[in-house]
Image (cartoon, rainbow, N blue to C red):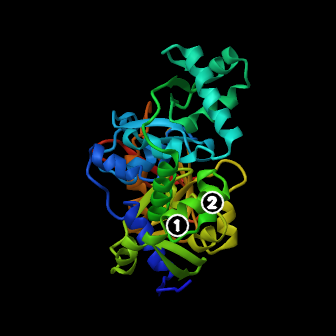
Amino acid sequence: MVWRLTLSRLQILGFRRRVGSLDERMPAGAKWLRRAAWAGLQDSVPRAALLSIHARVAGTSSSSWEHASLVQLWGPRFHNYVVAAKDLAIFSLGRLPEDAKRRARAQNTADGLDAVLKGERMPFGEAGRAMGVQPNSVRYAAATGRVLMRWDGARQPEVWTVPPPDVEPRQARIELARRYLHIFGPTTATSFGDWAGIGLAEARDAFEALASKLTPVRTPLGDCWILSEDEAAFLAQPEPAAPARLLPSGDAYYLLWGADREMLVPEVKRRAELWTTRVWPGAVLVSGEIAGVWRRAAAEISIAVWRRLSAAEREAVEGEAISLPLPDLKGPIHVCWGASVRRRKRLGHPARKRVSHKC
């Protein structure tokens, strides 16, 4: 392998923020929602996909996750994902196993589900019982591209079947790898397989198919690959980072493992606070660096920062918090700061009343 360039931590993180539209929000519209969901929007925590859209797309409303251009399915690692309807094949068939036994299980599950549903929608638990199988096994059918779902965060997901995409599974997997390289690069085939929930042989095959379009690089993560077409963007002068963004649990920017986590958050203690052993909190992104974590309970946003923020930085974080397009709120959003913020404020806002205080 011949390394053409060496990339620094700042170049890598700047590139990832830029391609992830975290430095500047995109306009509203189906085209930009698709870009926001280029590597899928994980939605396993209720409305996480909506908040990931909000971090990237201007004018996001509480119903943006249900835009006609988007669909829900069990995506990578069988997590709930929101993706562009045009990209259904990539996030479903792209994960269909090559192994004959596992592929047959997926197809047979889809056939059984289709026979039970008869064109209707049904809670997936009820559908599984009607099929005589453990309900969670219904998720195996998702890799066929024939099963969609809707989960509102409160009740069981409803599932229904659709015609299979007219795409060859290997081609879908290659495109899934290309998407992963663009959003998560620099990276490796092993990391791609872990993220997509596919076998290492399948992940390597996808990278080999892209070999003519890849450039080897040296990074703080070790020896990795990037898309050759992204080289100029990695080397470009960094753009100004957004003052603040609140990223939800499972957001693509920190959906990382191993050395990737160490690069994003160098301090061991802080990594343990962000990537917990249970449900992850959200990440507080301030001027391009993760500076803390946040959680929500109804209309209260609790923020714990890892360093002292300036007055302007606190204003920016609060502005993001009170602008979150949370559905079904019965009152104003309250921002509750951790012990590192010493003063209280009560501020006005044209849309909602902002209330911030020390926890």
What residue lies at 55% left-to-right and 20% top-to-bottom?
114
Q: Is residue 177 left or right of residue 267?
A: left
Amino acid carrying label 2: it is: Leu
Judging from the image, what secondary structure is the residue with disc 1 in? strand
Residue 86 picture quarter: top left
Compared with 143, 239 (above or below) is below
The residue closer to the viewer here, 38 or 302, is: 38
- In the image, residue 225 lies at what x, y percent? 52, 73
Judging from the image, what secondary structure is the residue with disc 2 in? helix
The residue closer to the viewer here, 266 or 160, is: 160
Q: Is residue 98 left or right of residue 16?
A: right
Amino acid carrying label 1: it is: Ile
Point out which mark residue 290 bears.
Answer: 1
- In the image, residue 280 lies at what x, y percent? 63, 52
- In the image, residue 25 lies at what x, y percent? 32, 57
Residue highlighted by disc 2: 274
